[in-house]
């Protein structure tokens, strides 16, 4: 029997924004979530009073005032500014590449001196038609920056030599000739005070939500109960992998509670050397300027994705583009199933983008009704 206007599969940002907006527009919604918690990958869990980003560090940033106002309806944001550090051979550098980095690297303090070094290296070592990621990166930023900041980190991230990675992975590498360590250049940035989970709880207030429910394990039964579906799970899984499996890069998180107040003095430290198996250490308390007596850190280990692992980064290559197009063509033919979010669209989305995309879907659905 039909009980709902919309069944929303997944309680991540995409599903939660859709559920909120569709409910406010007068539709009856049910959210089902296969994990034992809401929030999808932005989920934070309070451990010893520290809000831990369980699926990787999440820093909210946007240039869009409407999106900023939207999230501020559901959470108060702090003034956190992402200023990561990079460790290479026991030396710390500021990121993103800026005058602090260039001073630490070459001892130069004037923008013109830094520019001169970079331009000279590009001229000397760059390539007219870069054939791989290494050649591309050197052509954009010169040899020193490539070798210290890009090579080891990227090879760990992708599990392959930079010589075997395609040039298009890196389109541009912004260089900043001011002493500005703010990673993002967006106007608005911060972390919801108390973590992302209360923000999602606020979005879903008054809406029926069922956790520990996998839509795909009883698809037929769910379809009977609803007029429409907003599906935010994996696209290939919806179609029972009939054309093949879409690939991802995944991550292992190694968490540690440490009985000291401050471990690394910063939320994000990147480990740039190839021989260190993890790419970053996150110290969660610094996202919210915590002063708890102990601390909690997470080491991130990139890995090949296998069925059963969490899907993190879609693979942007020909094989997966062709495959995802086959599934997307099928999805376009659906009349009452709407696909959205990072998994169902097989694309990398930042949080502000996924919210914008959900709002635009709801607008379309409300107009069509
Ligand atoms: P999300 O994956 O969050 O939600 C989908 C939900 O559907 C999940 O809860 C899943 O369990 C559920 N689901 C799937 N299949 C189901 C089924 N069959 N039945 C029921 N439920 C099902 N962005 C940013 O702006 N700043 C940042 O700092 C970061 N950092 C970051 C770090 C890392 C490591 C990654 C991989 C990504 C980021 N992001 C980010 C991006 C951010 O995580 C992303 O934009 C949102 O989480 C996407 O929200 P979705 O709702 O699309 O997916």
Image (cartoon, rainbow, N blue to C red):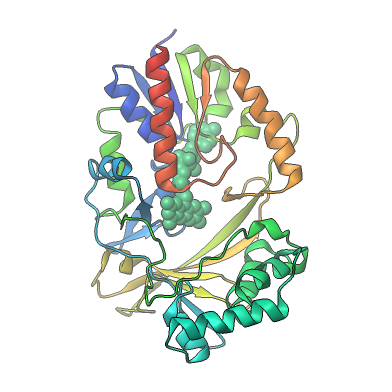
The quadrant where residue 130 appears: bottom right
Q: Nearer the viewer, residue 237 or 61?
A: 61
Residue sitting at 51 percent across and 83 percent down?
Answer: 114
Q: Residue furthest bottom?
A: 107
Q: Is residue 245 visible?
A: no
Q: Residue 100: horizontal and vertical position, in percent?
A: 42, 81
Q: Residue 138: horizontal and vertical position, in percent?
A: 67, 73
- Residue 179 horizontal side relative to residue 335, left or right: left
Q: Nearer the viewer, residue 311 or 61?
A: 61
Residue sitting at 57 percent across and 17 percent down?
Answer: 220
Q: Nearer the viewer, residue 220 or 53?
A: 53
As displayed, is residue 157 above or below residue 187? below
- Residue 144 horizontal side relative to residue 198, left or right: right
Q: Is residue 162 visible?
A: yes
Q: Residue 108: horizontal and vertical position, in percent?
A: 47, 89
The quadrant where residue 360 appears: top left
Residue sitting at 44 percent across and 43 percent down?
Answer: 353
Q: Residue 333: horizontal and vertical position, in percent?
A: 62, 18
- Residue 127 horizontal side relative to residue 280, left or right: right
Q: Nearer the viewer, residue 344 or 81?
A: 81
Q: How many marks can you see?
A: 0
Which quarter of the rendered picture does the C terminus lie within? top left
As displayed, is residue 309 above or below residue 34? below
Which quarter of the rendered picture does the N terminus lie within? top left
- Residue 185 horizontal side relative to residue 230, left or right: left
As displayed, is residue 228 above or below residue 233? above
């Amino acid at each position: 029997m039909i009980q709902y206007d919309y069944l929303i599969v997944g309680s991540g940002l995409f599903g939660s924004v859709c559920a909120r907006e569709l409910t406010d527009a007068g539709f009856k919604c049910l959210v089902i979530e296969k994990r034992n918690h809401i929030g999808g990958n932005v989920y934070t869990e309070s451990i010893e009073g520290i809000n831990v980003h369980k699926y990787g560090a999440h820093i909210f940033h946007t240039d869009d005032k409407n999106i900023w106002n939207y999230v501020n309806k559901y959470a108060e944001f702090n003034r956190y500014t992402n200023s990561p550090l990079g460790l290479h051979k026991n030396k710390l550098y500021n990121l993103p590449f800026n005058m602090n980095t260039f001073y630490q690297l070459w001892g130069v303090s004037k923008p013109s001196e830094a520019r001169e070094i970079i331009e000279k290296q590009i001229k000397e070592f760059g390539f007219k038609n870069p054939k791989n990621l290494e050649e591309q990166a050197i052509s954009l930023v010169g040899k020193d920056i490539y070798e210290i900041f890009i090579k080891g980190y990227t090879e760990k991230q992708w599990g392959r030599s930079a010589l075997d990675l395609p040039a298009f992975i890196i389109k541009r590498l912004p260089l900043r000739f001011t002493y500005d360590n703010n990673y993002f250049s967006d106007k608005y940035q911060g972390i919801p005070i108390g973590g992302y989970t209360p923000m999602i709880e606020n979005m879903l207030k008054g809406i029926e939500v069922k956790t520990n429910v996998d839509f795909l394990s009883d698809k037929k039964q769910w379809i009977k109960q609803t007029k429409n579906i907003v599906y935010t799970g994996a696209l290939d899984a919806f179609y029972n992998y009939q054309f093949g499996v879409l690939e991802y890069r995944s991550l292992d998180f190694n968490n540690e509670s440490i009985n000291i107040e401050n471990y690394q003095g910063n939320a994000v430290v990147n480990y740039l050397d190839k021989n260190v198996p993890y790419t970053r250490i996150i110290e969660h308390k610094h996202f919210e300027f915590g002063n708890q007596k102990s601390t909690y850190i997470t080491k991130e280990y990139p890995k090949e994705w296998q069925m059963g692992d969490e899907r993190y980064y879609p693979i942007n290559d020909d094989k997966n583009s062709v495959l995802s197009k086959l599934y997307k063509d099928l999805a376009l033919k659906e009349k009452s199933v709407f696909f959205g979010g990072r998994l169902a669209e097989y694309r990398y989305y930042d949080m502000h983008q996924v919210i914008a995309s959900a709002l635009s879907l709801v607008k379309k659905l409300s107009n069509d009704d």
